[in-house]
Amino acid sequence: MKRILLKSLIFVAGFFVGLLTPWYFYINYVTDTIVQDQWDIPSIVYARSLELYEGQSLSPEALSFELDLLGYQATSYQPKIGQYNYQDGTFLIVTKGFNFPDTQTKPQTISLSLEQQKITAMSPQLARLEPPIIGRFFTSNFENRRPIKLIEIPETMVKGLQAVEDRDFKNHHGVSWLGILRAAIKNLMAGEVVQGGSTITQQLVKNKLHYNQNSFLRKIHEALAATLLESKLSKAQILESYFNEVYWGQDGKVAVHGIVEAAQYYFSKPVGRLSVAEQALLIGVVKGPSWYNPYRQTKRALLRRDVVLKSWLETGVINQTEHDTAKNASLGLSKSRQLKTDFDDYMDVVKSQIKQQFSLPDLKSNGLRIFTSMDPYIQFKTTQTARKTSDWLDTKTQSAILVSGAKNGELLAVSGSKNANSHYNRALLAKRQIGSLIKPMVYLAGLELLPGFNLNSSIEDRPITLKTADKKTWQPGNWDNKSMGSISAEDALVYSRNQATVDLGQKITLPTFIQFLRQMGLQVQRNTHPALFLGAIELTPFEVQHLFGIFSSRGANQYINAIRYVTDQNNQILSRSKQTMGHSLSVRHIDEINAAMNQVTLRGTAKKLTQSFGLPDPLFGKTGTTNQGKDSWYAGFTHDYLATVWVGRDDNKPTDYSGSSGALILWGHLFKNL
């Protein structure tokens, strides 16, 4: 009997040792991962920062849009940090400050007056707002987080978290048995679960291990891990890890983790500038980010905030005055999330260009800061224009629009579709024949390569028959089925004459023209058909933007860039955008082509812009149409902006539109709004 009992005891002891030993090592491993935690930090992509100075062209609508996008709150009183007041043409703004690569700006008060779309008076003389966030590069788990030191978090928030979630935090060793007993009594009295007994340390373990079931075994596991973790980290380190790890809500498919992103998501503020009311709301949301979501459950979130404030008053975290002020405050949520602004198409360009310099793992985990040239207001207007394609044309046509700085080649806005839910970015991906958009390049090649040729030279707009490489004959025709005879090269370009352009092309020769286009940065494949002189080449709208950027910048820019510079987490610049020139074009020749493209908008195929839309001269541009209206193009510029518009059908079927009746309509509406 004794032998049987002894064997039983040895078996039971061995069983528990065999069970508990690997369990202990697993818990030890889990706590070590928390101690050594290195978070994947997504890279942030910013739009350009709005610079303000006297004489700058700016409308009240554009400035208000920018401020709302940045999460500034409009007020009728004296504004505080992150607020603005607008009355009778005068803005009073108190900025939030920002850590720019060249300098760290502190919050400051800006006063400026606007008249006739310009800043007429301003104090200080020069200022800039912080750049809006337009996107991030996430890892596969889509967690948004940026770490912060405990010392940078307001003291009321640090003490307030303990007052609400774990009043015995300083005294227990990971598990508060008193808290568990207190919660059990309250739950029994209520007849339901109204309070949990988990400590902050236990919640940290739960968040880290992504527990989603309240089983007894899980509670034991959580308690043991919390106890062991308290022997490895100080109380301050546990609080810091908690504030950086805890889940605060969901922004679409992106999980908002950590106090830094929570403050940005709900209030568009840095943590250090959260008011007591805002701090209390965030601490209250921790209990149930979905249940207390202030954007969807306003009353519920407000009641929860007031419960937190009452707890803070009872425990001495805040005084009566602070309590009363915070309780009477509105939620004050940022409006930036409610603005219907789509940055996805622009982000496609950023992704395409940034991958040439940085690897995806670096972008997803190293917390880089990518500063772009995107103008949020111009992006908003561009998106609006694309959305109205069906209103101005028909329901079967699609559109793509790009806008860049005319002189510097910086990409300001992109719309790849008229549909808000489209995942196909036509501006970047759709290769379509460009038609007469090629003609300015033909005439520029003539100026560059043919001795004695200028735009006053005569060329022949007459029927012409050519033999192609496959021994077939080709007879180009004009859009009006007429021929004008001997005309100047300028008139041939202004009136988009096909026969005259081919006549000039024959003088240049096809191989020479192909080499010329390659020097302009176009990847032209081997082409033996003279229809190339009339645009029988497939380019994306983005490639067309590159092409016309040569004209708008007078040869200074050959490539359109979205990215200005990239910094690391320490704000050190890692790379800057560079313009590399593959051409040596004459500025005088470019100016001659630009003068002709100005005439296109006054008396040529784009005269509708000045005559119907009433846009002010000077305008420059060229229409483009392919056979049966399958592609309608207009690429044009002012002294400030260059824009390319494409209109057509995804199935490449004919449309009723030419360049002047299709794409030009969208271009005209866009520039009228700008």
Image: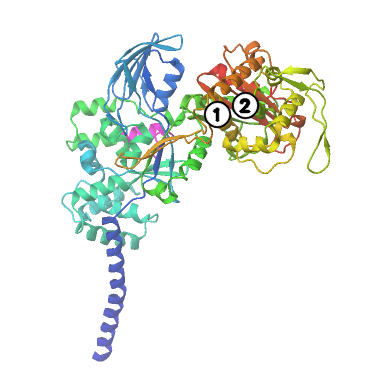
Residue 225 visible, this orientation: yes
**Residue found farthest to the front:** 451
Residue beneath label 2, please? Answer: 444
Residue 421 visible, this orientation: no
Q: State the SS at label 1.
A: loop
At label 1, the amino acid type is: Leu
**Which disc number belongs to residue 405?**
none
Q: Which quadrant of the rendered structure holds the N terminus? A: bottom left
How many numbered marks are there? 2
Residue 290 position by quadrant? top left
Residue 96 position by quadrant? top left
Q: In the image, 590: left or right of 205? A: right
Tell me the colour scheme of the image: rainbow
Task: Give the mark nearer the N terminus: 1 vs 2.
Answer: 2
Q: Mark 1 touching mark 2, by CB under 8 A?
A: yes
Q: State the SS at label 2.
A: helix
Crowdedness of circle 2 by 10 Å Cα count: few (<14), some, many (20+)? many
Q: Is residue 123 magenta?
A: no
Q: In the image, 380: left or right of 301? A: right
Give x and y (percent) for residue 53: 36, 16
Crowdedness of circle 1 by 10 Å Cα count: few (<14), some, many (20+)? some
- Magenta span of residues: 290-305
Q: Relative to 234, is 8 above or below? A: below
Residue 549 position by quadrant? top right
Q: Relative to 179, is 160 above or below? A: above
Give x and y (percent) for residue 113: 37, 11
Residue beneath label 1, please? Answer: 585
At label 2, the amino acid type is: Leu
- Given residues 51 and 669, the one toward you in this image is 51
Residue drawn at x 48%, y 41% as measured from the top left: 353
Residue drawn at x 28%, y 35% as measured from the top left: 271
